[in-house]
Image: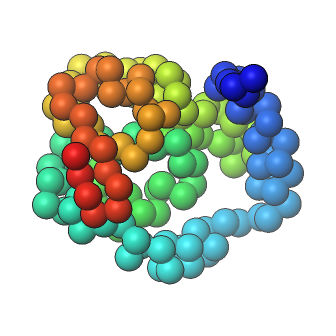
Amino acid sequence: MFHLFTVEDAVDAYAGFLEGYYTQVGSLEEDVKKFWDKNEKKIKPWYNKVRKDDDIIVSGTTDFLLDEIMKRMNVKNYVGSSIDKKTGKFICLCFLENKVKIFKELYPDAHIDNFYTDSMNDKAMMDIADHVYFVNKDKIE
């Protein structure tokens, strides 16, 4: 009735589409650069006000998209969904409770003082943070 699904269900549902697209496109580097040239301005200015050098960005976005924007923003620590660049298959999906699992695997000694999110899908990450902030455009609560 609620159409609840697991990380595995999401991978199965999305994987076929992504694998076919990813392997047929060839190199995505130029497309990714064009994407961020157009969309980088959508990153809200409040982040630069709270930003710290030891920030860790945790996102469900795929690594091939994150790599470019993290480089542009000079963010060294980030976690995203990973895809095998040869096959287009998911290596891991950084979504729901999987975000915590991947975060802890990559940063086992990290402590989350402040966690910013725009989605209740991040409940598992909220549960391990000292302070949680909900972001809606430029409004932070």
Q: Nearer the viewer, residue 13 or 53?
A: 13
Question: Is 49 placed left or right of 137 in the picture?
Answer: left
**Residue at left offset 13%, top offset 60%:** 49
Left or right of 35: which side holds 42? left
> Can residue 70 be seen?
yes
Quarter of the view holding residue 21: bottom right
Q: Residue at x 54, y 58 (%)?
A: 65
Residue 74 in the image: x percent, y percent? 28, 60
Residue 62 is situated, as x and y percent measured from the top left of the image, at 57, 48
Nearer to the camera, 112 or 140: 140
The answer to whether 5 appears left or right of 116 in the picture is right
The percent coordinates of residue 110 (x first, y second) are: 24, 25
Number of marks in the rendered image? 0
Instruction: Answer whether residue 78 is visible to the viewer in this image.
Output: no
Looking at the picture, tell me which residue is in the foreground, 97 or 88.
Answer: 97
Residue reaching furthest to the front: 1
Q: Is residue 7 above or below residue 80?
A: above
Q: What residue lies at 60% left-to-right and 33% top-to-bottom?
A: 93
Q: Residue at x 69, y 48 (%)?
A: 85
* Quarter occupied by residue 108: top left
Above or below: residue 45 compared with residue 123: below
Quadrant location of the N terminus in the rendered image: top right
**x, y percent for residue 97:** 50, 22
> How did the renderer colour the structure?
rainbow
